[in-house]
């Protein structure tokens, strides 16, 4: 198809201008979102961010209590949020999760594949059972959920799927031979899904966190040297807060990202860009402390505590 130059708009189309106010561009009003692993450090913030942007949110996790408590907190904040207990170990869980959203609200517009298990273990100690287990939760269930959700999204005329990746899709990290390759597979899945579904209105992307200050990764920050290693190599010299995932997630889920599909967006404080030369050990730590003392802290527990 060739573009007719006479049809290329030169004036600012009022219909487009009307859509560009941030409140409209990033709004999820009327949409239904599913977040897996919603009781986790990042999942709860994604559920909150989507809910506050107007979406009805299904928070699903393997245990009943944490996701129910978070859903209750969100309801108190005026969000239409429901918990669904589903263990992704269970083969029927992907179908049950999508059915949960359909039964509650009759549609599914956004799926976030966020649940994961993570075992940091040297490759020579990885057993076949462990390999199967991690790939099942981190890749296969995300694949199956995407398949089922995409089918409904195509019938509805559109939707957005976000796989939560990691910087370990791009860089090798010690003892991460289980999760890293599974996350890298999600990047390729987003591309494959884009090719199959983008023309049908379903966009698929990856949102990949770097080193965030979350309970699951607290061991990094408590470790005698690892926190320094990370901060010395992170251009922003600080860990990310899980709430900092929300803005980019809204971009990918909403009309603001209407022409984005098949991409991996890294929320990593610049880690993947590279690092400074000759940084003496502990520089990042000192810069982070100065950042906190300057009152620029975003919130959450002080990791030095
Ligand atoms: N925290 C970080 O700094 C970081 C860094 C890179 C990538 N990530 C990615 O971000 C996502 C969220 O990470 P997080 O720090 O919130 O992790 P988390 O461990 O706090 O959350 C993961 C959630 O998945 C759930 N889950 C695990 N097994 C399940 C199962 N069988 N069935 C149902 N639910 C199950 C857990 O109960 C948990 O609530 C993950 O995909 C992770 O790989 C996080």
Image (cartoon, rainbow, N blue to C red):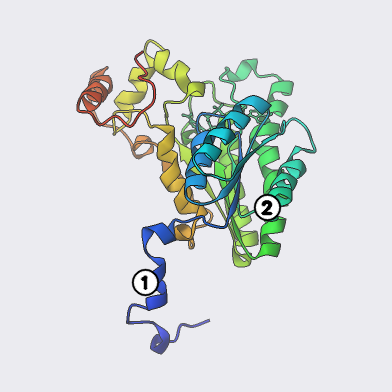
Q: Give how far across and how far down residue 79 sits, in percent.
A: 54, 44
Query: In the rendered image, is residue 65 in sight?
Result: yes
Q: Is residue 18 above or below residue 111?
A: below
Mark 2 to mark 1 CA distance (whole Å): 31 Å
Residue at the farthest top position = 224
Q: Give how far across and how far down residue 22 sits, in percent.
A: 37, 58
Residue at the farthest right position = 92
Q: Secondary structure at mark 1?
A: helix
Q: Give how far across and how far down residue 296 sits, in percent.
A: 25, 31
* Res. 17 mark: 1
Numbered disc total:
2
Q: Is residue 60 above or below residue 254?
A: above
* Res. 55 mark: none
Q: Give the residue pinned by disc 2.
A: 105
Residue at left 40%, top 18%?
Answer: 221
Residue at left 42%, top 26%?
Answer: 213
Image quarter (top left, top right, bottom left or bottom right) of the C terminus: top left
Quadrant of the picture in which ligand 1 is shown: top right
Q: Is residue 139 left or right of residue 22?
A: right
Q: Is mark 1 within 8 Å of ligand 1?
A: no
Q: Is residue 25 left or right of residue 131?
A: left
Q: Nearer the viewer, mark 2 or mark 1?
A: 2
Q: Nearer the viewer, residue 121 or 80?
A: 80
Q: Give how far across and how far down residue 182 sits, in percent.
A: 61, 35
- Determine which quarter of the picture holds residue 302: top left
Q: Is residue 31 above or below residue 63?
A: below
Crowd class of label 1 (few under 14; some 14 to 19; many from 20; radius 10 Å): few
User: Which of disc 1 and disc 2 is earlier in sequence?
Assistant: 1
The reply to whether the C-beta atoms of the residues labelled 2 and 1 are less than 8 Å apart is no
Query: In the rendered image, is residue 147 in sight?
Result: no
Q: Nearer the viewer, residue 143 or 106?
A: 106
């Amino acid at each position: 198809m060739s573009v007719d130059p006479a049809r290329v708009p030169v004036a600012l189309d009022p219909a487009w201008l009307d859509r560009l106010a941030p409140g409209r561009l990033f709004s999820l009003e009327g949409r239904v979102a599913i977040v897996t692993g919603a009781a986790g450090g990042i999942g709860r913030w994604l559920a909150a961010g989507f809910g506050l942007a107007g979406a009805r949110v299904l928070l699903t996790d393997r245990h009943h209590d944490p996701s129910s408590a978070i859903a209750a907190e969100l309801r108190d904040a005026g969000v239409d949020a429901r918990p669904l207990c589903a263990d992704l170990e269970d083969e029927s869980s992907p179908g049950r999760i999508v059915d949960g959203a359909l039964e509650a609200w009759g549609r599914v517009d956004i799926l976030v594949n966020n649940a994961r298990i993570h075992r940091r273990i040297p490759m020579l100690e990885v057993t076949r059972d462990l390999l199967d287990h991690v790939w099942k939760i981190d890749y296969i269930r995300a694949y199956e959920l995407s398949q089922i959700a995409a089918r409904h999204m195509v019938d509805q005329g559109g939707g957005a799927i976000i796989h939560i990746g990691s910087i370990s899709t791009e860089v090798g990290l010690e003892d991460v031979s289980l999760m890293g390759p599974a996350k890298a597979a999600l990047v390729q899945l987003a591309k494959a899904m884009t090719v199959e579904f983008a023309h049908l209105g379903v966009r698929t992307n990856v949102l990949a966190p770097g080193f965030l200050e979350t309970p699951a990764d607290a061991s990094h920050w408590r470790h005698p040297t690892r926190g320094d290693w990370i901060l010395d190599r992170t251009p922003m010299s600080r860990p990310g807060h899980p709430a900092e995932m929300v803005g980019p997630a809204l971009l990918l889920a909403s009309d603001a990202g209407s022409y984005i599909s098949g991409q991996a967006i890294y929320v990593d404080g610049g880690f993947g860009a590279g690092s400074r030369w000759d940084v003496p050990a502990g520089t990042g730590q000192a810069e982070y402390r100065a950042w906190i003392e300057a009152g620029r802290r975003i919130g959450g527990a002080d990791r030095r505590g």
